[in-house]
Amino acid sequence: NSNLAFHVMLFLEGWCTLTFLEYILHRLWMHDKNCSSSMTQMHSHHHKHPTELVVTNFHRIAMIAILATLVLIANYLNNYFTFFVEFL
């Protein structure tokens, strides 16, 4: 039972860390007015035309399948890999 709690805590910690890193990258890199990289330009286009992003049921099912596989691998390994599941 404590093993499950350990992995849940690692998963949540990874989730919080990933969310923070995404925010920092989004705020400081993607919105840099002086940067003219293609990634920044694509991101700017995304903000100007947010409805052009298309997420299909295939994308959702594939993401759930990948996440479920990684969670099973993390459970099998029974180590700190669970923390990195969110990053993959």
Image (cartoon, rainbow, N blue to C red):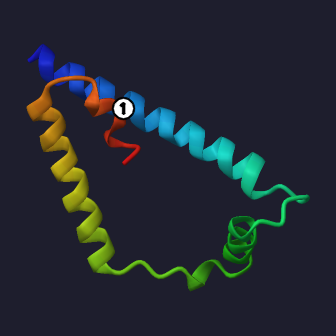
Which secondary structure, mark 1?
helix
Single out the residue that lies furthest toward the right: 34
Residue at left offset 72%, top offset 71% = 38
Q: Quadrant of residue 40?
A: bottom right
Look at the picture and state if 85 lies above or below 31. Answer: above
Q: Which residue is mark 1?
A: 12
From the top left corner, tell me how far across and down residue 64 is, in percent: 24, 60
From the top left corner, tell me how far across and down residue 78 is, in percent: 14, 25
29 on left or right of 71: right
Q: Quadrant of the N terminus?
A: top left
Residue at left offset 14%, top offset 41% = 73
Single out the residue that lies furthest toward the front: 37
Front residue of 39/25: it is 39
Residue at left offset 21%, top offset 46% = 70
From the top left corner, tell me how far across and down residue 47 is, in percent: 71, 72
| Count of numbered circles in the view | 1
Look at the picture and state if 5 lies above or below 32. Answer: above
Q: Amino acid at mark 1?
A: Leu
18 on left or right of 46: left
Label 1: few (<14), some or many (≥20) within 10 Å?
A: some
Front residue of 23/25: it is 25
Q: Quadrant of residue 63?
A: bottom left
Single out the residue that lies furthest toward the top: 2
From the top left corner, tell me how far across and down residue 9 is, in percent: 30, 24
Look at the picture and state if 53 lies above or below 67. Answer: below
Residue at left offset 32%, top offset 73% = 59
